[in-house]
Image: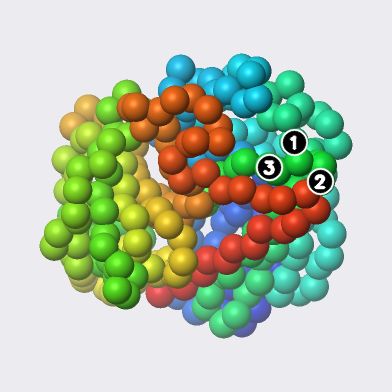
Amino acid sequence: MMIVIENDWLKVEISHNGAEVRKVKHKKSGLDYMWTGDPAYWGRVSPVLFPIVGRLKEDRYQLNGKTYEMSQHGFLRDVEFKVDEQTTTDVSFRYESGGRYLHVYPFDFKAIIRYTLNEDNLVVHWEIVNETKEEMYFSIGAHPAFRIPLLENENIEDYSLHIIPAANKNEMEYEIENSLIREKGMANDLLTIPLTDSLFANDALIYSNIDQVTLASNKSNHGVEVRFEGFPFVGIWSKYTDGKIAPFVCIEPWYGIADTYNTTGNLKEKFGINRLQPRESFRAEYKMKLI
């Protein structure tokens, strides 16, 4: 069963499973913006990544002398959320861990994911509450996949990425090898990146200190703006197979990142990790404008 919210611009369908957006249709243009979830390429559409983003080295970490195993991107994307509140244009989903994942993540938490429509914008708000009696360590990230091309007379090569860096900060670039990351250095010439079949041959593009990424057609100007001021990282990814990219691009604002090659494996020391005191809340928000 899907939860539907809509206004005069957009109709959005969201699954209880993972509180995952599955469809976004623009009523004025008639365009469907989200990836279909075809498992031939990638079976998800917009999972929420928690309590890790990316992959851990050897899929494990240590905390307080104990070793835990966890697969890529964590487990929140696969849990069943409950609807907390709902109006025509707004819905809030809630999940309380209640001790169910202590064997892989030794913290109890509450996750609230809220979706709000504002004209042609879908606003996504996260709240994570630490419900344990000790400091909690976590990452959280978005992974929405947008369909390309949007129009039948377009090709993937008709699209470009337009990137707006954060003001007064240095943009850094990272590379991935065997699912782990290393810093490449300062990112240069990021304003416009044309889409090509080889763009994601070496996995995702990953940057820090970026405020907005727009994926837009050079022919029709249709596309999506993803705005995420204050997020430390962003990943941009598409499945690369047999010399071609899949018919979607993910724009992924992250509070966290995969393990580095030289990680100690200690969760407290993990690059990009967030800390939350007992009973405190973490909040973050990003927006998707459908053009």
Q: How is the image coloured?
A: rainbow
Left or right of 280 on screen, residue 61? left
Residue at 43% from the left image edge and 36% from the top image edge: 258
Q: Which residue is mark 1?
A: 107
Element type where label 3 sits in the image: strand
Q: Residues within 10 Å of mark 1 (few under 14, many from 20)?
A: many
Residue at 56% from the left image edge and 36% from the top image edge: 268
Element type where label 1 sits in the image: loop
Q: In the rendered structure, which amino acid carries the disc numbered 1?
A: Phe
**Mark 1 touching mark 3, by CB under 8 A?**
yes
Q: Residue 187 or 48: which is nearer the viewer?
A: 187
Q: Is residue 234 above or below residue 261?
A: below
- Quadrant of the drawing holding the C terminus: bottom left
Q: In the rendered structure, which amino acid carries the disc numbered 3?
A: Met
**Mark 2 touching mark 1, by CB under 8 A?**
yes
Q: Which residue is mark 3?
A: 136
Residue at 29% from the left image edge and 73% from the top image edge: 168
Q: Which residue is mark 2?
A: 131
| Sequence-earlier tag: 2 or 1 | 1
Q: Residues within 10 Å of mark 3 (few under 14, many from 20)?
A: many
Numbered marks: total: 3
Q: Residue furthest left?
A: 189
Indicate the position of residue 5 as horizontal and vertical percent values.
Answer: 70, 68
Q: In the rendered structure, which amino acid carries the disc numbered 2?
A: Glu
Indicate the position of residue 28 as horizontal and vertical percent values.
Answer: 50, 79
C-alpha gap between disc 2 and disc 1? 7 Å
